[in-house]
Image (cartoon, rainbow, N blue to C red):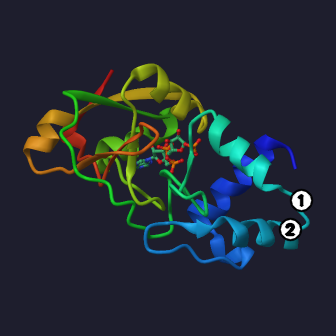
């Protein structure tokens, strides 16, 4: 299995459908590396511990973490499965950015940003990163989120281990076109 394909498979298993591979995440989203490798092998994906370590270390967005002793692995963010990543709420910068596609704008202006199937709304620290996120869905558009103002109003913000800002929802009145 190529590294890119392995990364995509890991995202799928560790964020969305562990049960499809006969796996269960623990409450914090971890799964045993040994069990994961066995589950991949059962699906005819030959992956060595070395390759897994390489993908974790070199992944372009640092999507995965190994436990300190190296026996467990989890995704750093992006889950639709309910997990508690143990992130501490922190004060966000004044502004954060959300990349989306123009076809979602009318709905977002009406309902604000919703987490949908994921646990959180994903926000970026800079507009360039947000634009790349938006491009995954179509013609990109970047929305500026008044993060400080939302935080002062009681909104909780988290920073994932790989630098993605997470929050529960962003009401429309905290959004402005960039
Ligand atoms: C949109 C990637 C209509 C939202 C990225 C987005 C990110 C609404 C889409 C991570 C809406 C959900 C997550 C509303 C939000 N009406 N559409 N009220 N509220 N939306 O993929 O943020 O490569 O679940 O704008 O880098 O695009 O996988 O979220 O367009 O960090 O590691 O609904 O995925 O990371 O799409 O991306 P997604 P996202 P990875």
Report x, y in % for residue 87: 32, 54
Q: Position of residue 19 (x, y in %)?
A: 66, 77
In the rendered view, tell whether residue 76 sits above or below residue 30: above
- Confirm or deny contact between disc 2 and disc 1 (CB under 8 A): yes
Which residue corresponds to the image point at 39% horizontal and 60% vertical from the top-left?
Answer: 85
- Relative to the observer, which residue lies in front, 42 or 154? 42
The residue to which callout 1 is attached is 46
Q: Secondary structure at mark 1?
A: loop
From the top left corner, tell me how far across and down residue 162 is, in percent: 46, 40
Classify residue 161 as left or right of residue 63: left
**48 left or right, relative to 128:** right
Q: Rate crowding at label 2 as few (under 14), some (14 to 19) or many (20 or more) other CA atoms within 10 Å.
A: some
Classify 10 Å Cα crowding around label 1: few (below 14), some (14-19), many (20 and above).
few
Q: Going by the image, does 166 lie left or right of 95?
A: right
N-terminal-most mark, 2 or 1: 2
Which is more toward the observer, 139 or 92?
Answer: 92
Is residue 30 shown above or below 51?
Answer: below
Checking the image for residue 41, the label placed there is 2
Gap between marks 2 and 1 measured at Cα: 5 Å
For the point 41% across and 22% down, the residue is 127
**Residue visible at 53% across and 66% down?**
30
Where residue 41 sits, quadrant-wise, is: bottom right
């Amino acid at each position: 299995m190529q590294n890119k394909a392995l990364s995509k498979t890991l995202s799928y298993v560790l964020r969305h459908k562990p049960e499809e591979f006969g796996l269960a995440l623990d409450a914090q989203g971890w799964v045993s590396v040994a069990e994961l490798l066995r589950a991949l092998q059962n699906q005819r994906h030959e992956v060595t511990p070395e390759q897994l370590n390489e993908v974790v270390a070199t992944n372009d967005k640092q999507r995965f973490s190994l436990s300190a002793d190296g026996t467990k692995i989890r995704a750093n963010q992006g889950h639709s499965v309910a997990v508690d990543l143990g992130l501490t709420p922190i004060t966000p910068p004044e502004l954060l950015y959300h990349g989306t596609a123009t076809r979602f704008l009318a709905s977002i202006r009406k309902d604000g940003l919703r987490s949908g199937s994921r646990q959180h709304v994903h926000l970026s620290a800079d507009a360039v990163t947000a634009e790349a996120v938006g491009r995954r869905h179509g013609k990109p558009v970047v929305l500026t989120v008044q993060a400080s103002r939302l935080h002062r109003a009681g909104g909780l913000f988290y920073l994932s281990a790989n630098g993605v800002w997470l929050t529960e929802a962003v009401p429309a009145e905290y959004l402005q076109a960039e």
